[in-house]
Image (spheres, grey):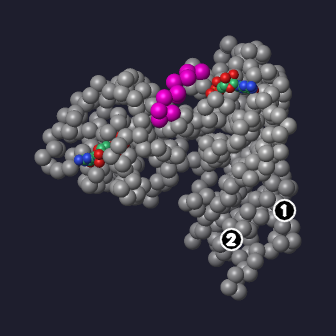
Amino acid sequence: DEDLALLSGDGVDEDGTGSSAPLPVLAVVGRPNVGKSTLVNRILGRREAVVEDKPGVTRDRVSYPAEWAGRRFTLVDTGGWEVDVAGIEARVAEQAEVAISLADAVLFVVDATVGPTATDERVVRLLRKSGKPVVLCANKVDGPRVEADATELWSLGLGEPHPVSALHGRGTGDLLDAAMDALPTVSKHGAAIPEGGPRRVALVGRPNVGKSSLLNKVLGEERVVVDSVAGTTRDPVDEIVELKGRPWVFVDTAGIRRRVHQTSGADFYASLRTQAAIEKAEVAVVLVDASVKITEQDTRVISQVIEAGRALVVAYNKWDLMDEDRRPFLEREIEQDLVQVQWAPRVNFSAKTGWHTDRLVPALERSLASWDTRIPTGKLNAFLGELVAAHPHPLRGGKQPRILFATQASTRPPRFVVFATGFLEAGYRRYIERRLRETFGFEGTPISISVRVRE
Ligand code: GDP
Ligand code: GDP
């Protein structure tokens, strides 16, 4: 009898789960028009009407919580990409590469009625190189007449093609069973970050906020570590640099440097890149252009960091463009739009002039220290005892849930499990989070609280 709820900086998470391990990630990959969106909608149980017949449906997120046969996972949706026709092959491959890097297993969708194309072959090479488990979906097999087409896809060398009609639902159960077999129960992402190695930083934010300017500033003024550092898995897309006497890894810097994201569909692509960088990092610096109004895209990136459970620093860049008139507006915007991350350290700087960029590293260190924090069980329960005495859970229908015991299940980020005799209201869980932050700090890290009901 479990009643779970999770707080994640901005309140209770939507699906009300309290698992302390990162969910495995299944990415749906394939060229445009093979039926990825249709398949994703079917897996998520969304109405088919959501799929539009034109390519390039704008999406505001890339990953969704999903479930099959009692297994929970994160589904990365790469459907709806707007791909310009010139250079389509290269772009599909590049986008697939990012999605694959995010995934614990890949659902590769091919249009069985068309058969393998050159673009498909190109994605296959990427899949092989990645070494990730792949489940091959032969889509658009609407009836037995087309079954033979699916068989042809054995030629891709990815094993058994699973004949599916995403449109009608035919074969999707078997496909998902195969996907669950391929998917590890726990994501490898968390484990991929070695403890004790150099800290891993992602510079994220919407296009043109100054990510590459900041990177150049950081790399330009400090010693770039050329030799591989012990305990580091160095990706060619990462940069290692010594800052304040210790090495730091800036992840996915190739994505920042390669300015390919200026065409249509850029938002979605940027969002996927951002997600990939966040997953590979321990702490994310979300850059915001302080000289213009905070946008929804800015807050969305911040939410991505919180949902991924990474430490956070919010950096207001282009401070050299700030005039006194803008200042009060900015403060008000921060109060209104960034209320859910009041706990994040804030740095104001100019990546262009270098003004105050030296404040970045101390902020990173503070956030990471919080991310690593473990509160001993005795201390935690003493804190809870005082909290409950000062402000007990409100009575509801003559009942009052009692808090029995709490423990910190994990760090990076801190996750707490509270055992209680009944469900704790969202408001009360927020109160616990607020008091935890007041008492123990946790500056710069999301924290989660799940509640387990014991009768
Ligand atoms: P995406 O670009 O890969 O996300 O592809 P979509 O999901 O947008 O689908 C492209 C087109 O193929 C749409 O017109 C869908 O209705 C159609 N489609 C998708 N799945 C199937 C299927 O299983 N059978 C048939 N006949 N059409 C499908
Ligand atoms: P990215 O897309 O996030 O990597 O952004 P860039 O680093 O390419 O910067 C976008 C534009 O903003 C460029 O023209 C930069 O010169 C400019 N820029 C970046 N940081 C600053 C800053 O601190 N002050 C000013 N005035 N301009 C900046």
Badge 2 amino acid: Glu
Ligand 2 location (quadrant): top right
On the image, the x and y values in percent for residue 139 come to: 27, 43
Label 2 belongs to which residue? 425
Q: Quadrant of the N terminus?
A: bottom right
| Disc 1/disc 2 C-alpha distance (Å) | 19 Å
Kind of residue sitting beneath label 1: Phe
Q: Position of 340 compared to 29: left or right? A: right
Where residue 18 appears, x then y in whole percent? 61, 58
Work out whether 200 lies above or below 446: above
Q: Residue 177, relative to residue 56: is it above or below?
A: below
Q: Which residue is drawn at 64% across and 76% down?
A: 455
The one nearer the camera, 350 or 41, is 350
The disc, 1 or 2, on the residue closer to the chain's N-terminal end is: 1
Residue placed furthest toward the bottom: 398
**Secondary element at image label 1:** helix
Q: Nearer the viewer, residue 35 or 249?
A: 35
